[in-house]
Each structure stands twice: as C-alpha cells, then as structure tokens.
Image: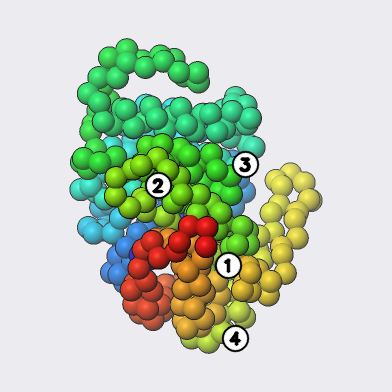
C-alpha cells in the first residue's frame, strides 16, 4: 500500500499560542512540505481545493502543484479533489495539462464536487445538479484529453465544435481518479470509465465505507472490464508521535480546533466530536505511536482492500515543527511496515 500526504492548506490560529501564520507563510509551508515528503519516501503529495471558507486557503491546486513541481522530481502530485462539478472542464483540461507537463508526467487529478454550499451560491449553480455536473464535466474532460478535436453538447456549458485544448498532458492515460463518498454515484462513474476511485473517508465511521469499496469491485466484475479492478484510495486525519500519550496530548487541541467550524460574521460554531471516540477503533482519525498507526492502517486495509492511503497531518494550526516531526516518524517507522500490504486482498461482500 502506498502512503501519501494530503493538505488543504488550513490556516487557523494555534490554539495554544494564539499565533496565526500569514497566508504567504502557510502556502510556503505547503510547498516545502512536498519536497520533504519526497525526500522521506512518500509516494504522493496531494493538495485539496476549497473556496470561500474560513480555514482553507487553496482555491487553485493547479497553481500550488506547479510551484511544487519545481522543487520535486519523483513524487506523484495530486489534487484532493479538483471540483470538476463546479469548474469549467475546458479550463480544467488546460490548467492540469500544464501541471502534467511541468511535473514531467506526475499529475494525478481526483475529480469531485464541493460538499459546501458556498461555491454553488457564488458560481450560480444549483446544488441539486452536483452529481449530473460531475458526470458531464468528467466525461468531457476525458474527451478533451484523449481526442484531438472535440465536438460536444451538454446541459451545463455552451457546446463545443472542433475544439482542441492545448497543451496536452504528458501521460498517455488520463491521470484521472474519481473522488466519492458514501453514495454510489461516484462508484458508477468510475467503473463506467474504468477509472480508479478515491473515497473521502476522513469524517465518518470506517465501517460505513465498506459497501462503497465492495460496490466498486462488484460492479467492475459485472461490467466485464479486462483485468483486476482499478486502484482504490482512502484518506484519514493522522498524527504520530514516539508514544501514544504524546501523540494524544499534542494533537487533541489542534484536531478540536480544526473540527470546530465557525461561520464568518456570526458567533455560531459546531462542537467537535469526543476526541477519544474520534481516534478510537471505530473513529475515522488515526492517532498514536507508530505501532498503533500501523495497526489501524492495517485494519482499514483489511476492511477496504485499498492500495493508497492519504494522511492529513497539518491541520488545526499545528506548528510546522510538529508536522515535520510527525511526517519524518511516519516515513521511518510506519511507511516500511505498511508498504507490504497487498492490493485486492478483500473479497467483495465479505
């Protein structure tokens, strides 16, 4: 199983010191963390896309990944996710072909849609059309990257007549994954086009996602695709320290800070979940010593049968020194232990 890092560029005050980085400082940390992740041996570095929120400051992963490409040479550069349901697929095709060129063919684009209401309001889109927009825009993106001249007509953007997007991606196969949740629309979209699937597993009980991974494998076989099912990915909020006690002591206030969602302009906020439950056996997050983290990643692999796991470490205003230490410890003591986990070892429906 491959391990990668995922960041959303969250920018919050440190709950212990009250210090807040500037946006420039935060973005520079995101870029330098990618180079350090490559040196440490991680397979992926993934940058999320959010708009108009209080805590996340990366609306365009393409720009950030282009900067990262100049400081790295081997690590896969991914989006987690690109909001294809909300973006013009022609511009997505152009922007991310540039990233693939600048990175010498290291792009992995995860196609999704925002689960926050703000982009739909600001961009003038009906949230009820999310699934339809995602499918239409993903299918058009595939054609724009694989066909020289595209003539097309759909529901959500003006028609195209003989359009060729430039530049072209380096990779012959479309470097495209479908991003999904607990619904099955994304499973069908991925299997319909024989694409890999990454499931957003950061916020719910792990058992809720077993039917999603099973459905992907079952549907793949039912459709008669050649070869084994495509790759499957997952993600978790993760923190590792030398001991369980230190990991919990350091991470609890930062994780609670991240999960306390405040609405700008109001005093309303949501209360974070119970921390012990959140990181427990049935919780979505992973926190503890290297051995504990290895154990939980192994159990998740047994349940899901995935072969890519993205780790979100830099959340809640946690200082960069703590992020770096956790990343290095993960690379040295967790990554070698999970690298041998095979793919496709779970029988669908088991």
**Up-down: is 320 above or below 54?**
below
**Extreme residue in the right direction:** 267
The Cα–Cα distance between marks 2 and 4, rounded to whole angstroms, is 45 Å
Q: Residue at x 37, y 17 (%)?
A: 152
The Cα–Cα distance between marks 1 and 3, rounded to whole angstroms, is 21 Å
Q: Are marks 3 and 4 in contact (CB under 8 Å)?
A: no
Residue pointed to by mark 1: 285
The one nearer the camera, 234 or 96, is 234
The Cα–Cα distance between marks 1 and 2, rounded to whole angstroms, is 31 Å
Residue 2 is drawn in which quadrant?
bottom left
Q: Which mark is residue 245?
A: 4
Q: Are marks 1 and 3 in contact (CB under 8 Å)?
A: no
Residue pointed to by mark 3: 116
The Cα–Cα distance between marks 3 and 2, rounded to whole angstroms, is 34 Å
Q: Are marks 2 and 4 in contact (CB under 8 Å)?
A: no
Q: Which mark is residue 221?
A: 2
Location of the N terminus by quadrant is bottom left
Answer with mark 3 or mark 4, whichever residue precedes in sequence. Answer: 3
Q: Secondary structure at mark 1?
A: loop
The nearer-to-camera label among 1 and 3 is: 1
The nearer-to-camera label among 2 and 4 is: 2
């Amino acid at each position: 199983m491959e391990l990668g890092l995922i960041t959303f560029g969250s920018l919050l005050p440190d709950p212990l010191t009250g210090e807040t980085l500037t946006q420039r400082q935060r973005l520079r940390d995101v870029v330098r963390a990618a180079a350090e992740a490559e040196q440490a041996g991680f397979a992926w570095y993934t940058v999320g896309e959010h708009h108009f929120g209080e805590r996340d400051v990366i609306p365009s992963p393409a720009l950030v990944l282009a900067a990262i490409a100049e400081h790295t040479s081997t690590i896969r550069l991914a989006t987690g996710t690109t909001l294809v349901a909300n973006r013009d697929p022609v511009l997505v095709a152009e922007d991310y072909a540039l990233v693939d060129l600048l990175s010498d063919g290291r792009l992995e684009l995860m196609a999704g849609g925002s689960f926050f209401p703000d982009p739909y309001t600001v961009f003038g889109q009906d949230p009820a059309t999310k699934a339809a927009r995602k499918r239409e825009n993903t299918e058009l993106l595939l054609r724009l990257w694989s066909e020289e001249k595209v003539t097309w007509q759909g529901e959500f953007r003006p028609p195209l007549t003989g359009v060729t997007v430039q530049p072209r991606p380096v990779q012959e196969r479309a470097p495209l994954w479908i991003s999904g949740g607990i619904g099955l629309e994304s499973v069908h979209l991925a299997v319909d086009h024989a694409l890999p699937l990454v499931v957003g597993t950061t916020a719910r009980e792990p058992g809720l996602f077993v039917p999603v991974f099973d459905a992907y494998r079952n549907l793949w076989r039912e459709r008669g695709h050649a070869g084994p099912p495509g790759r499957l990915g997952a993600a978790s909020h993760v923190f590792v320290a030398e001991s369980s006690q230190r990991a919990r002591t350091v991470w609890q206030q930062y994780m609670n800070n991240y999960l306390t969602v405040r609405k700008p302009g109001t005093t309303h906020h949501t209360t974070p979940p119970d921390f012990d439950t959140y990181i427990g056996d049935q919780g979505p997050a992973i926190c503890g010593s290297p051995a504990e983290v290895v154990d939980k990643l192994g159990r998740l692999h047994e349940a899901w049968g995935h072969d890519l796991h993205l780790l979100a470490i830099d959340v809640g205003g946690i200082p960069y020194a703590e992020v770096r230490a956790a990343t290095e410890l993960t690379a040295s003591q967790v990554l070698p232990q999970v690298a041998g986990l095979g793919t496709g070892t779970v029988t669908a429906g088991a």
